[in-house]
Image (tube, rainbow, N blue to C red):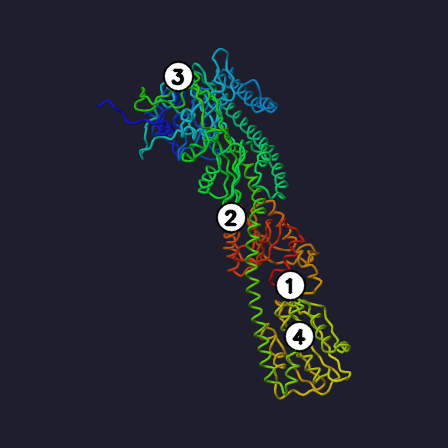
Amino acid sequence: MSGTHEPVDLTNCDREPIHQLGSVQPFGFLLAVSSDWIVTRASANLVEFLGVAQADAIGRPVVSLITPEALHAVRNKLTTLRGPDIVERIFGIALMSDQNRFDIALHLNGGEVIIEGERCQDDRRDVASLSMRSMMSRLDHTETLEAFFREGARQARALTGFDRVMVYRFDEGASGEVVAEAARAGIGSFLGLHYPASDIPVQARALYLRNLFRIIADVDAVPVPILPQRDEHGQPLDLSMSVLRSVSPIHIEYLKNMGVGASLSISIVVDGKLWGLFACHHYGPRLPSAQSRSTAELFGQMFASRLESRERRLALDYETKARRIADRLLTSVADNASLLDDPAWLIEALADAIPADGIGVWINGRLALAGIGPNERGFAALVRHLNRNAAGRIYAVDRLAEAYPDLEVDDAVAGMLAIPISRSPRDYVVLFRQELVRTVRWGGDPHKPVEYGPNGPRLTPRKSFEAWSELVRGRSLPFTEAERRVAETIRVTLIEVVLRLTDEVSMARQTANERQELLIAELNHRVRNILSLITGIIRQSQATSVGLGDYIRQLEGRIQSLARAHDQITRDHWAPASLRQLLLAETAAYLGKNAQRIQMSGEDVLLEPQAFSTAALVFHELMTNSAKYGSLSGTGSGTVQLGWHRDDEGNLRIGWREKDGPPVVEPKRHGFGSTIIRRSIPYDLGGKAEVRYIKDGLEADFCIPARHVVGPTSERSNPAQVGTTEPKTNPDDQPLSGLNVLLVENNLIIAMDGEDILRRLGADVATAPSVTEAMEILAGRSFDLALLDVNLGDETSFGIADRLATDGVPFVFATGYGEGIAQANSHSDAPVLQKPYTMEGVTDILARVPLPRRG
């Protein structure tokens, strides 16, 4: 041998198979029994307890070792086991006919039953004099967490009788701190000491989560092997849930170095995680009775339950306060467009929620800094680093220099909490904390120098447990879990603010540019169309005119009719215009004082611009022909009855009836005017036209499709204020009755509100909080309508909209950001419902959605 050793590191302890040591502590015995109650393994000390040698027990029925009554009790107790990580106990049972009493622990391991026994202790001095109820009462009456921990340590010491009981709390890095202690006089104090994560290896922490109680009765005891060591598959016995499991030699050496003769630990599990331990030390051998240990284990679980309630209550109080701060922040920022100009007020606004020493704001490529933090160059580089993180996630570090070693940051800045407040582009509010220079009292050197010891080429535990101080540099006060939850609340608040202050401005600018380009293109298109239309009118009128005078008069009348229609459309900025006003304008132009000869009836409706222009030409020609040849000709008493109504499908039906005029005969040759009457509405609008030449007068019927018809003018009296008038749909009518509606909303409370409104309107509602779940629902079910929240936290609902559009399902976007947010995508024509959901808002939007007709 050259005398050199292989490198040793801190993972040696982590690799030790402490659950497969193949031996037990000698204060009890172990039997492994197959499912058919045959002994498969036994500890070598079996003869000391049951009078049967280990070698003789293997392969025998267990009933040959213990009485049938004892076996019956064991089998009954096994029926109460519910899972592999449960240990049941039987106290004071006689296993043999000599009436010696044993305390038994039972658990399942794969297909085997593990029976562990120890002699029943009759010494009642270990039994706690206080009831569990009184112990919990004393805990409940403590006012602070520190007092709660101290009382817990005192109660645990009263239960176990150990010399020292510590409440040991893990931090996020798995290092531990003694936060409370109860100890007999004269042995010193470990209170406030820190212990590095390597003191409790990874696999030991995993066992603490599974097996909540651990006793080491005597560090000098010689372990008793379990034989055979390996089964027919070559596997050792898994002792994870064993009460008697022997101890790692490294841990024994660790305890001896501390002068400890016995130890006991009770896991403190809070919210499914290992919060810490009751760590108990005795400076000599000590084995509390099984009943006392069971009571101590129950106390540990009750303590953890009370601790969880306290921590949740404190977190709730803190987060409630933070939400009030966030609400005030939203109110303050909502009308403040100078967020980037004066970010320092954000520190003041957030100080009570998340204490910080500086702040950086990055919005749309612009930055602002206040307080302690990096310079502008360093902050810009930090933002580039942050962009590598997952979008929409809060990110906190308390050692900034270690997280970003290539970042140029002042040494005074050590901690950071980054709050992303948009997704594209990435914007941030970053809180900075200065370096917290402090002295930590370690229970020995936390860096644990590597040595070779009596256990071979493995790490030897520290041999000095004097307080060892380390000056902690480059680290800030960590951001707590509660502070990160508050940061998430603030993130959502600031997203709304920044979208309002930046995205809407940018979008408005983009929309304005697009609108200007669109208007130029539309103007060019309309001018060309008008020029082409006039050219066609000139050409067609010339072809049918009999003289220059008639030609000029026809041409002039038709162009004036178009001009009147254009005036009415442009008066409302190219919005739908009134049919009645169109007809009144044409009547006034032809009949003047005799306008009463046309008798009109029907509730006024609005026609879209294209339909309005087409209708103007058609009724101009009807009036022209009637004035020349029909009931409006001459000075007679002839009249025209002109009526209209909307049918069940929303189509506009118009009827023209001439009365008391000269006899009518169908012309042998149809001119340009007759062609306009018969073909314009079918050709331009996809409607219908029928003309009948009856002797008593001309009759014509027209049908303009519903898509060109808006509705009564009373419905459009104030079209800009959508949702402020009375709903067009009476909720009592249940317009969604019999329809399936998909609601996608990521906030449960808001979703419940939306579900309630939709169900009151008669819908059968299915709700999804995310894109993934919505897609799963759509894969197995069809819908008649969908209501989609635009922003779903880290994603949007635009992908769901694509799927619905492909399937032909109508949908409505819902948002609190304004219509521009929802319509900045390929579905810009989709209706937008402004949040919050209201009955009036939902019923109003339904009038704009093509719902399937109910049978």
- Helix, strand or loop at label 2? It is loop
Q: Which mark is residue 311?
A: none
Q: Earlier in the sequence, mark 4 or mark 1?
A: 4
Q: Point out the image quarter for the C terminus.
A: bottom right
**Label 3 amino acid?**
Ser
**Between 530 and 640, which is closer to the camera in this rendering?**
530
- Helix, strand or loop at label 1? It is loop
Residue shown at the point (56%, 17%) measured from the top left = 129
- Tell me if 208 is positioned left or right of 734 in this view: left
User: Residue tagged by mark 3?
Assistant: 464
Q: Does the residue at mark 3 contact the one at mark 2 (Cβ under 8 Å)? A: no
Q: Which mark is residue 573?
A: 1
Q: CA distance from mark 2 to mark 4?
A: 53 Å
Q: Earlier in the sequence, mark 3 or mark 1?
A: 3
Give coordinates of residue 269: x percent, y percent: 50, 30
Q: Does the residue at mark 4 contact the one at mark 1 (Cβ under 8 Å)? A: no
Give coordinates of residue 435: x percent, y percent: 48, 28
User: Residue tagged by mark 4?
Assistant: 561
**Label 2 amino acid?**
Glu
**Label 4 amino acid?**
Ser
Check the image and report above or below for 545 versus 145.
below
Give coordinates of residue 198: x percent, y percent: 40, 26
- Tell me if 205 is positioned left or right of 486 in this view: left
**Between 757 and 739, which is closer to the camera in this rendering?**
757
Q: CA distance from mark 4 to mark 1?
A: 19 Å
Q: Does the residue at mark 2 contact the one at mark 4 (Cβ under 8 Å)? A: no
User: Residue tagged by mark 2?
Assistant: 795
- Helix, strand or loop at label 3? It is loop
